[in-house]
Amino acid sequence: MRGALATLLLCALAVLWTNTAVAQSDTTDLRQEGDFGTSQKAWNGLSTFAALAGGEGLQVLESTRIDWEELDSDDVLVLLYPTNYVDPTKVVSFIRNGGRVLIADDFGTGHKILAELGGRRNRQFRAERYQGDQIFAPIAGPTGIHPLSAGIVALTTNHPSALSNLEGIESIFSFASGDSVVAAGELGLGRYVALADPSVLINRMLQFEGNLQFSINLLRYLIRPGESDRVIVLAGPIALDGEPRNSYDDGTWRGSVSANVAQINGWLDEINLWMLMPNTLRLFTLVAALILAVLLFLAVPQARHKPLDGAWTRAAPVPGPTELAKSFSGAGPRTSYLLPAAIARDNVNSALELVLEEPDPLYSHSDRDLLDAVSTHCSIGASRTLGELLPRLRGIPQRAQAAAHWQPRFVSLREFEQLQGNAETFLKSIKTI
């Protein structure tokens, strides 16, 4: 009897231990060592993704800790399944100032970043198709035309989450329930992609044709052509220290100015940390006064050889056709074509004078009266063409103002060519050419 009781007790303990082990395994993270390693060539690594990035001329850096100050707008930041808290406001600030970011997360802490960008992570969704009829491998389809979905019919996932309640972010791939697995958006000067299944990028999943093309599209969508040179991958227990920069030079005029101003502010902050002694402060004040004196001397026009009659404040004389052709031949993209636009406007005004037999009709008539007069003297088509041209002509200043050094507005070559083409169309319609 005692032997039987001991046997029953051991069996009960074994069953209890087995159930406990099963319960623990259900809550254990299924990810393995080597997941998302950029040099890992096993099925769960990112060596194929890193090779694709290298083919785009990018250097792939893998880390778990980085300072925001080390990142600029030419970098592509890839956050894969973060398990530590990452401040969403700093991610948003980085993107807004020109950063490019991929947030790929299914069950980590990335849902807080996604919520800040306009999406909610959802584990309840329904797919129409599954890879190999495996319930853990639902297939998503493109929701529309987008660079991320170019050339892709289906995207295969592996134990994914989904994105729902999207606001301000565009769905790119979705399941039959309407929940998305890929979404993308632009914020300020930057752009970002949200991927609800980071395993889409691992070596095994890139064996599927759609996934491989998606990885290529993803890199090309996030990089700045000719400027980006790094892809920085942070996975798992990551940490981003410090604060993102206030502005990045994204190649535009606005981005360049903002970046320079931010650099000056940073330099001033560093100077502010110094303790200036009285003698040093006097020397600094003296140097600043000398610099201001030199700038004032250079700014005020000199009157050594001719009287200061104020001529330097007036507009320059309008050049003739020969001088005008020379000044605009081979002009660069920053050249303003305001003066040629003013000449084109005057040509239209002169043609209207001949047709309507009235002086300066462009300035002496309202838009409605002028269009009615052209319709009466010419044709309805000429009146319609002039109606499309009038808003542009009204925005061009007088020829003398257009020839001044400080021009009231900037007219690009493209804008001038459109204006000139519309003007020639109108002149032909009233048979003055």
Image (tube, rainbow, N blue to C red):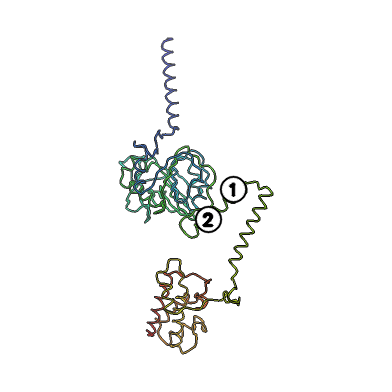
Q: Does residue 432 appear to the left or right of 112 in the view shown?
A: left
Within-10-Å neighbours for mark 2: few <14, some 14–19, many 20+: some
Q: Where's residue 342, x and y in %?
A: 47, 77
Element carrying mark 2: helix
Q: What residue is shown at x 39% (from left), y 54% (from top)?
A: 226
Q: Quadrant of the C terminus?
A: bottom left
Residue at left 33%, top 51%? 152
Q: Position of residue 328 (x, y in %)?
A: 42, 72
Whole-angstrom CA distance, mark 1 to mark 2, is 15 Å
- Which mark identifies residue 2? none
Residue 101: x and y in percent read: 45, 48
Relative vertical location of residue 345 with respect to residue 150 in this rendering, above or below: below
The residue that disc 1 covers is 270
Q: Amino acid at mark 2?
A: Asn
Mark 1 and mark 2 lie on one chain; the one further toward the N terminus is: 2
Residue on which the image places disc 2: 260
- Mark 1: give few (<14), some (14-19) or many (20+) Cα within 10 Å: few
In the foreground, 117 or 416? 416
What type is the residue that disc 1 sits on?
Glu
Q: Is residue 356 above or below residue 302?
A: below
Picture residue at 47% right of the left edge, 37% below the top: 237
- Quarter holding residue 199: top left
Outermost front residue:
305
Q: Quadrant of the N terminus?
A: top left
Q: Secondary structure at mark 1?
A: helix
Q: Position of residue 372 (x, y in %)?
A: 46, 84
Q: Which residue is nearer to you in this view: 391 or 39?
A: 39
Tag 1–tag 2 contact (CB < 8 Å): no
